[in-house]
Structure formats: C-alpha cells, structure tokens
Amino acid sequence: MTPTAARTYEVRTYGCQMNVHDSERLAGLLESAGYVRAADGEGADVVVFNTCAVRENADNRLYGNLSHLVPVKQSRPGMQIAVGGCLAQKDQATILERAPWVDVVFGTHNIGSLPVLLERARIEQEAQVEILEALEVFPSTLPTRRDSAYAAWVSISVGCNNTCTFCIVPALRGREKDRRPGEILAEIETLVAEGVLEVTLLGQNVNAYGSEFGDRAAFAKLLRACGRIDGLERVRFTSPHPRDFTDDVIAAMAETPNVMPQLHMPLQSGSDAVLQRMRRSYRADRYLGIIDRVREAMPEAAITTDIIVGFPGETEQDFRATLEVVRQARFASAFTFQYSQRPGTPAATMPDQVPKEVVQERYDRLIDVVNDIAWQENRRQEGREVEVLIAEGEGRKDERTERLSGRARDNRLVHVAACDARPGDVVTAEVTYAAPHHLVADRVVSLRNTRAGDAGVVPPAAGVSLGMPTLRG
C-alpha cells in the first residue's frame, strides 16, 4: 500500500520582527502536526498569510494576494488558505466576506490553534474563524522552526501599554505581558547549546519589561544576565521607547561585553508639538539627551531610528525641527515612513491632514539628509577592522565580486571579500569602502569557524519576507 504523502505548507509573512518570529512558530506548529515545508517554487497544500496592519494598503496587498490564489486553489483539490496576524485580528468580521475562499482566520492571540482549525475546516468543509481577545498562553511555549542556525529571536514580552495616536498595535496585540526572566534565560541557554551565537530580545517596548511584575530595573538586569551565558556572543534588542529609556540600561549595555554597541530607538518626530499630538511622552531634548549619554558610554555605538513624515497638523516648522534632530543625532540609518491614515487610530480622524504632495516633498528632503549623514558616518569606518558574523540572505553588493555578507557588531551591513567562511562563521576584515547603506571590507584579517557554521543554516520558510524592519515603539 502506498503511504500518503505529507501535506506541504508555505508561510507568507508581512510586518515587523514580531511577525517574523510568530511565523517561525507557525512553521513549528505545522511541522509538529506532520506538515512539510514546500520546496521553493512549488505549490503548497496550505498557504498561511501572517499579516500586518501597520503599513499603508496592508489590506489591499492581502486581498490582492488572496485573489491570485483563487485559480490555484481551483486547480488543486484540498488546498487550504489561512489568514492570521494583526490584519486578521482587526478585520475578523470582513475577511470571509471579501475572500470567501479562505479556509481559516485566526488572530494574534491564538496562533497555536492553527493546525486544529485547518483540520476542522477540512473535515467540516466549512471556514473556521477563531479570534481571541486576550493572550491565554505566552507564544514562546509553542514549537518553533527557526530560520537560522546562528541567530534567533527571543520574545521577552508581547503587547504594549502605550497609546500612540498613530498606532493600532496595542489594540491588536493587547496590553503588555512579560515573561519571567528565568524562562527567557532558559530559552537563550538552550539556543546557545544548539549553536546560536546571537539573540535579539523582542518586545513592542522592551525597556518597559518588568512593569507587569513590578521591577522597573528588570530589563537592565536581563541584559547583564545575558552577559553571563557562556557561548552567547551577541545580544541585541528592539524596540525601546524613549520614555522608558533609563541610565541603568545604558550602563548595562556599556558594561556587558556581549551586548552590541547598537541602539534602534524610534524618534517618530523631532517636533515637540507633533510628539504631543502623537501622544509620545518625551520631547526632542530628552531624546537627544539619551543619545548623548549612550555615546558617552559607548562612543562607537551605531544609532538608528524610525521617523514619520506628514503626521496630521505637521507644519513646515515642525518638519524642520525633525531635520534638525536628525542632524544632531547623526543616525547610522533611519527607517522613514510617510504618514498614512490607519482606521481605528485617533490620528486617522484628526484635523489638518497633510496633503499627499506636501508629505512626499518633505519625505524626499528627509531621505536626502538621512542618506547624507549615514554616508558620512559610514565613511568614518574606512580603515577600521570590523568583526562580521556571516549571514545567509543578506544580499551581496555585487554578485560578480563573490563577496560574503553579514553584520558587524554595531549591526552595519558589511560585504566581505570571498573566503572560506560559512553562514554563522565570524570574519574580521578591514573596511576598504563605505556606501550610504553598507560597508565593503576586502582585506580579510582572520576567519573563525563556529559551531553555528558547522551546523549550517536551516533553509528559510518559503514566502517569509521582512516587510517592515522594526517594531512600532
């Protein structure tokens, strides 16, 4: 008797790092249930959309992609389509109305239900919708199929207690829920035992970590505890909120050798008036003060940010205030966004929405300033030796050069001269050229093979893509 072939799956991910990590869990759940990842370029029996509700036209993008699957599903008996993530949490009542060929809709709080919902939909031949309004089990307890042998996401919290007027995430992810430090450190120790060299601590607002169990110093303590884990070479975190950024965290960063000299801290606007309308509980002077203290403690730290252009009521004077903060902060890079109305947020109904053509013109000016400063900051790296963790999938500056790519300790993208390094190995090389968004290091000084390199890279799940680089914070 011929055995039945395992059903295949594909996960398509949109959004921030939290969504990418959730997709690793979805892949782990499906594989635990007997599914097999579909080979690249081959159709899957189950296609899962892990959606984002932050970016403009997120819903149009989803429904456009869903419509493309209609003829595929018609020609593939038994194929199933599932929609989860933030957009599913927001539009739970309308997804099946707009796309009745979808089989499963699930929310941000119940990703663990996906295999059961798929099976129930198959048996009952009827679409299944399950949206929980609050988190019942912290998702890190779920099985995970990680995309990398050398780097891993580690959630320290989910949800957010802030009420930024442009952001819908708190309504979709819920209030902040913190994991206990012992659980986090146990997960990291397990990862390191498997060969992982680098972890990124994830939370919507990582430096508010501990507020749920009453320890405002918990995040600084967690960073220092990470420094005591043998074999853990790099620790990063995203995203902090300037309101909660305290000097004990700066000290922990500076005094813990495996915490990287890198900080991604969203600015959003350099105008105090706009920050007030955004309900961001800090002002430009406080933000710049944090940066000054970080650089005093870690002079070579690379600082990156998020900026929104064209928030309702933003004047030319407000925009120029943002440009001034950018010039003073001297960001290594910035993720810049044109404000877009998101239904369900207070900002969507504010008066004085800025005309699209004005937003575009300001956005172009901001990009010019950001890129110019980033290039200046990168040129300061020329002639320096950098330690690069070779990565899979970073992309190369020029395929003809056969350079390898990876991240320096300060998280700058570096293209290294071809050598015998594998993903997960560490190369020390001299920077020979700087571009606005990457460095080239053609003089290799040394190569260190690692256990992560020995293990090789787990192939990334089909369809996973990083649509937005940072968590809202």
Image (cartoon, grey):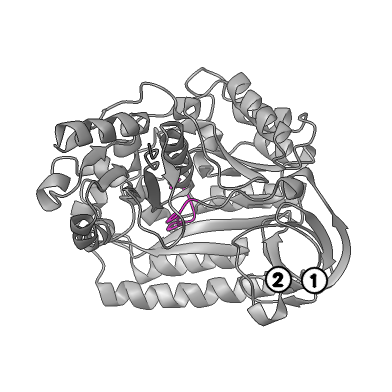
In the rendered structure, does residue 185 fall within the stretch colored magenta? no
Q: Contact (CB < 8 A) between labels 1 and 2?
A: yes
Q: Quadrant of residue 231?
A: top right
- Can you name the residue that lies furthest to the top here? 213
Provide residue 164's location: percent of width, then percent of height. 35, 44
Q: Amino acid at mark 2?
A: Leu
Please state which of residues 256 and 429 is positioned toward the viewer in this rendering.
429
- Can you name the residue that lies furthest to the bottom here? 400
Tell me, yes or no, if residue 254 can be seen here.
yes
Provide residue 77's location: percent of width, then percent of height. 22, 50
Instruction: Give the residue at mark 2.
Output: 439
Give neighbour class at mark 1: few <14, some 14-19, many 20+ (Cα, 10 Å).
many
Bounds of the magenta span? 461-473
Provide residue 31's location: percent of width, then percent of height. 45, 37
Q: Is residue 5 left or right of residue 447?
A: left
Instruction: Give the residue at mark 1.
Output: 431
- Looking at the figure, which quarter contains the N terminus? top left
Q: Amino acid at mark 1?
A: Val
Describe the element under mark 2 as helix, strand or loop.
strand
